[in-house]
Amino acid sequence: MKYIDLNSKKGFVNLFADYILSYFDHTTVIEVSDCGPFLVVMGETELKKVVDLGPIKENFLKEYPNYNLENLNIIDIISYNVENEYKGQWFKYYDTERPIYSESEVNKIENKKEKIKFLYPPMTITSQFPHGYGLDKGRFDYYFGEYVTNHILIITNADSIEIKYLPSLGVEDLVLKLNLENSLLGKKYVVSLLLDTFYTKENLSELRKLIESYNILEDLKSPLDTKPWLIKNKIDDIVVV
């Protein structure tokens, strides 16, 4: 994942997407596009009751005055009562303190500048995954994959790992792809290890509770801070033969 500077225009639209999402449920996707004089808020949700973005906008302006925005002109085109099945996607992780970021991205975060950077000419800038995406629209799988990677990269000795998981098909349908150039373990063994140790109904439920307690706004505000799912509770269960 590319690091998004909270103090940039891109950081602003992604933070606002997550902020709006916090007023919806886990089945919702919110996308915010900055088009210069106005913001377009698109989205889909299974909710039937319309959410008024007016008060949400005002609360955002009060909570984040550092953006120096006196007002936000919003075009709301969120679709309600929409049921679209999440079909899964590939997520890539790295052997770093925050596996969603490569070493170069971690260095970029540590060297970030604090000044707001809204100086370039107006252009359309749109929020991006995982920001604005509910837990049931890929965000849970994204965090869970980071939790898994935090355990197994150290035993595989791989530089990176890609995981795609389709929860709607059941845990037996985990799709796994590994960068095995420097790995000490084969793909079949690692797939079996993940199914037996991590992708069990009990463990998925336990991690779901941890992730649901997380304030998603912290993804942008504190990208390298401790995350509740970056634990190693299954180390004793990993057996390498």
Image: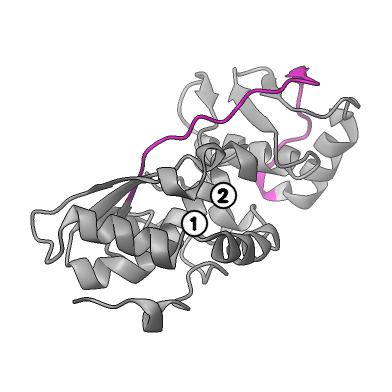
Asked if 48 appears above or below 175 in the picture, the reply is above
| Residue sitting farthest toward the left | 181
Indicate the amino acid at tag 1.
Phe
Up-down relation of residue 34 to residue 210 (above or below): above
Residue visible at 76% across and 22% down?
Answer: 73
- Camera sees residue 111: no
Compared with 104, 32 (above or below) is above
116 left or right of 217? left
User: The disc labelled 2 sits on which kind of residue?
Assistant: Phe
Quarter of the rendering occupied by the N terminus: top left
| Residue 178 drawn in magenta | no
Q: Nearer the viewer, residue 197 or 153?
A: 197
Q: Position of residue 55 (x, y in %)?
A: 90, 36
Whether residue 84 appears in magenta in the rendering, the answer is: yes
- In the image, the segment drawn in magenta is 66-92
In the image, 224 versus 173, the foreground residue is: 173
Q: Secondary structure at mark 2?
A: helix
Alpha-carbon distance for marks 2 and 1?
6 Å
What residue is shown with label 2?
A: 140
Residue 144, image x, y percentages? 49, 56
Check residue 144 in the rendering and tell me which mark sits there, or answer none. 1
Magenta span: predominant SS is: loop
Name the residue at 91% across, 27% down. Answer: 49
x, y percent for residue 38: 69, 18
Q: Which mark is residue 223?
A: none
Horizontally, residue 24 falls left or right of residue 83, namely right
Residue at 59 percent of width and 17 percent of height: 35
